[in-house]
Image (cartoon, rainbow, N blue to C red):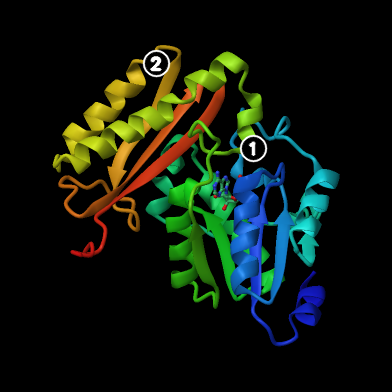
Amino acid sequence: MRSACRAARRGGRMGFVPTMGALHEGHLSLVRAARSSCDVVAASIFVNPAQFGPGEDLAKYPRHFERDRGLLEKHGVELLFAPSVEEMYPAGVVTWVTVDELSDKLDGRSRPGHFRGVTTVVAKLFHVVEPDAAFFGQKDAAQVAIIRRLVRDLNFPVEIVACPIVREADGLAMSSRNVYLDPRQREQALVLQRALARVKKSWEAGERDSAKLMAEGREEVAEEKSVRLDYLEIVDPDSLDPVEDVGDGALVAVAVFVGSTRLIDNVLLQRLANKATA
Ligand code: AMP
């Protein structure tokens, strides 16, 4: 893969989209973003065991390799890396890449070891593909913050581009895990959107107290009785530290269990730069 990437780039800018496959429009939006700003685009499909905890859905994670390969080809991806687990983690591997502190927050707190798996595999993939830019979805907001820190702390010469969350028509964020939901759960999952919308509305109406905003979001989740809240937090989007006064902006991140399916979503509270006064 490394020599194929070196041969294909011919001095141009190489964009890279890492995925776990079971591709949907969210993934394809990253490919489009990569294509629009890079000369050559590479992607990877690897269901990374190191980022799944015991009892999580590694075995049942959806895998549709031939379909995914066709989609990537159709969308102009020139290089696809789909290694086996043995290729990525040969016997005897003992080296891990950990972004301390950030990796124990949000999803990292609920899924111990998850981000160590993510940062290790992303570091390895960056060494293989040697991209100039790598494209990640804002849907996994904590992951974006952690990868930005990884790149900064370990001097990877890679620009990290975060792309907007792609949603279904009714607002549910696209996820490879949505296929686990039965029709009733699919309906219940919309509580993520409602909780985030309520927090955002309240913030837009002038509420700045993070504790009050979080309480409103959590209350909204509690109204959907069959859904179990994992977390709803308001944090700094870079450090992932809690913020008390939301001020000019913050990240509202939420995770819930719908049945045994864990779903996440988030919204950035951002004050728009000076609106035109025409
Ligand atoms: P995954 O295959 O779930 O590991 O996701 C691969 C990449 O696609 C990650 O950077 C995700 O953040 C991104 N992604 C997944 N779902 C979405 C979505 N609904 N919108 C935008 N990006 C997404």
Residue 49 shows in the view: yes
Sequence-first disc among 1 and 2: 1
Residue 187 in percent (x, y) is at 51, 19
* In the rendered image, the vertical position of residue 222 relative to residue 76, given as above or below: above
* 83 sits to left or right of 175: right
Q: Amino acid at mark 1?
A: Ser
Q: Nearer the viewer, residue 221 or 153?
A: 221
**Which residue: 33% across, 51% down?**
240
Q: Taking 278 as reference, is 140 above or below it?
A: above
Instruction: Residue 176: give its label.
Output: 1
Which residue is depicted at the point 34% across and 35% down?
196
Report if the beta carbon of the residue with label 2 is closer than 8 angstroms to ligand 1: no
Residue at the bottom extreme, as displayed = 11
Disc 2 target residue? 224
> In front here: 80 or 30?
30
Q: CA distance from mark 1 to mark 2?
A: 23 Å
Question: Left or right: 87 with respect to 33?
Answer: right
Above or below for 101 versus 161: above
Question: What percent of the width, then of the height, locates residue 274?
Answer: 21, 64
Q: Amino acid at mark 2?
A: Glu
Query: In this view of the protein, which residue sits in the foreground, 145 or 180?
Result: 180
| Residue 129, image x, y percentages | 70, 70
Q: Is mark 1 within 8 Å of ligand 1?
A: yes
Q: Tag 1: Cα neighbours inside 10 Å, few (<14), some, or many (≥20)?
A: some
Q: As rendered, which of 147 and 10 lies closer to the eye? A: 10
Residue 275: name its quadrant. Answer: bottom left
Residue 195: % across, % down: 34, 29
